[in-house]
Amino acid sequence: MGAILKNQFRTFLRNPGSMFMFIFPLVMVVTLISVVNATPGTGQKELMAIYASLLTIGVMSVVNTSFGANFMELRTSSLIKRLGTTQITKPQLLMGYVLWTIFQSFLEIVWVTFLMLFFTSWTHSLIDISLFKGASIDWVGVIYGIILLIIVSFMTTFFFISIAPNSESYQLLSLLYFFVVLYFGGLIFSFANIEWMNIFSLLLPQTYSAHFITGAFNSGNYDVIINGVHQKISIWDFRNWSDGYIKVGASSLNLIMPIVYTILIIPIAMKKFEFDA
């Protein structure tokens, strides 16, 4: 396992494409915070929502490229054929890719956090609002939400790996899904008042984890207005199942649907999965 991780690290350092995981979040942070700053009534709550969206975008992109794209290339490489002459098994190789991707995901989370702090709290260069100062954060909820996010990102990537016949098809499927989540999952735009888009977003597992993380950053509550009434709803409350709660992304579905999707999709992916191309 150590040899696999060392090889992944050396490949990461040699590959110019590795810079994508640093450049893409930088572009997204500058763009989204600038847009939020130009929007009247912006406060810490909106900034934390952007932070949750950026974490979701970052982890998704890392899992799609570091695990998905690299594994698809591995399937067609000569390394698979040479495994029989080594003590490394296919499950060990797969687990090495998973562990390396998890490490990169946490590295991406640290990088996004650094960028958010740099452009807000430390320099106030993009917006004159501090990210964490004075904020009440449910850190257990944040950790749980990030774990859910990593799980569903692996789940969707593994599904695309299982059904894609080659690297080109995988790239097309994963990129299409990434942009669908980006624009229709409420990560950049809110579609709470557009019924069909709101319903469509419920089909995207990352939507639930992003909403849950946003609530965790907001004192562990969903701060919403339903039927003209302002409400604070705990992210751990299992009682909020009505259409009104679901419409504003404040339902109990955020807590459990990523797990439900994983349980439903992983068996399908396992049935179709082939290690060799």
Image (tube, helix red, strand yellow):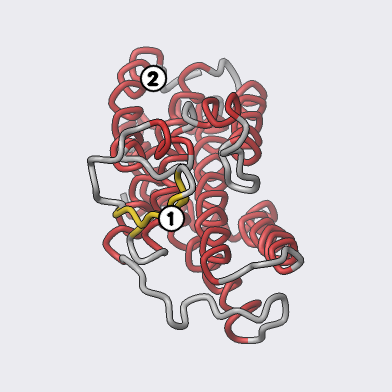
Tell whether 236 sits left or right of 90. Answer: left
Secondary structure beneath label 1: strand
Q: Which residue is mark 1?
A: 230
Compared to residue 49, the image places residue 42 above or below, namely below
Compared to residue 70, the image places residue 46 above or below, namely below
Residue 33 appears in the rendering: yes
Residue in the image at 63% along x and 57% along y: 14
> Which residue appears farthest toward the bottom when viewing the image?
123
Residue in the image at 30% along x and 42% along y: 255
Mark 1 in CB contact with mark 2 (< 8 angstroms) = no
| Eye-nearest disc, 1 or 2 | 1
User: Front-most of 107 and 134?
Assistant: 134
- Number of numbered markers: 2
Residue in the image at 66% along x and 81% along y: 128
- The amino acid pointed to by label 1 is His
Compared to residue 277, the image places residue 108 above or below, namely below
Q: Which mark is residue 140?
A: none
Q: Which residue is mark 2?
A: 269
Q: CA distance from mark 1 to mark 2?
A: 42 Å
**N-term-proximal mark, 1 vs 2:** 1
Q: Quadrant of residue 36?
A: bottom right
